[in-house]
Image (cartoon, rainbow, N blue to C red):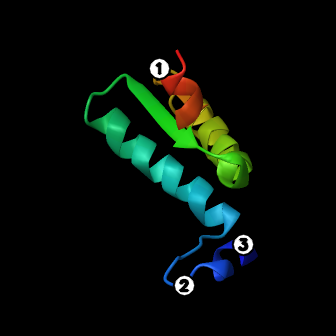
């Protein structure tokens, strides 16, 4: 959370909050009939995104999920 203090106007979430948001998004995605969820991340939020994604995979095994850096997606 402390890294965003360098830039005025930015906000930050606790890791647990970000992971929980990912699960809530996936709940909506699955209930809306989607079969895939692609998450974009970067170094500073990678761990909480992975935690959230593991919870999603446990709850919704039929949902195909992936976590990528936007830059790595652009290189392909």
Determine the image quadrant of residue 34: top left
As measured in the structure, the alpha-carbon distance from the residue carrying label 3 to the one carrying label 1 is: 36 Å
| Residue under the image location 66 percent in, 70 percent down | 14
Secondary structure at numbered mark 1: loop
Q: Is residue 58 left or right of residue 62?
A: right
Indicate the quadrant containing the N terminus: top left, top right, bottom left or bottom right.
bottom right
Residue 76: % across, % down? 52, 15
Note whether 8 is above or below 22 in the view shown.
below
As measured in the structure, the alpha-carbon distance from the residue carrying label 1 to the one carrying label 2 is: 41 Å
Question: Which badge, 3 or 2, comes first in the chain's sequence?
Answer: 3
Q: Seen from this angle, which residue lies furthest left?
A: 32
Return the residue nearer the eye: 16 or 3: 3
| Residue under the image location 34 percent in, 44 percent down | 28
Q: How crowded is mark 1: few (under 14 residues within 10 Å), some or many (20 or more)?
A: few
Kindly identify which residue carries mark 1: 62
Report if the CB atoms under discs 3 and 2 are less than 8 Å apart: no
* Picture disc at residue 8: 2
């Amino acid at each position: 959370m402390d890294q965003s203090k360098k830039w005025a106007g930015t906000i930050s979430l606790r890791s647990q909050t970000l992971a929980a948001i990912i699960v809530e998004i996936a709940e909506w995605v699955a209930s809306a009939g989607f079969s895939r969820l692609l998450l974009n991340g970067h170094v500073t939020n990678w761990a909480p995104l992975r935690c959230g994604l593991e919870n999603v995979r446990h709850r919704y095994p039929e949902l195909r999920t992936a976590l990528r850096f936007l830059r790595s997606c652009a290189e392909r």
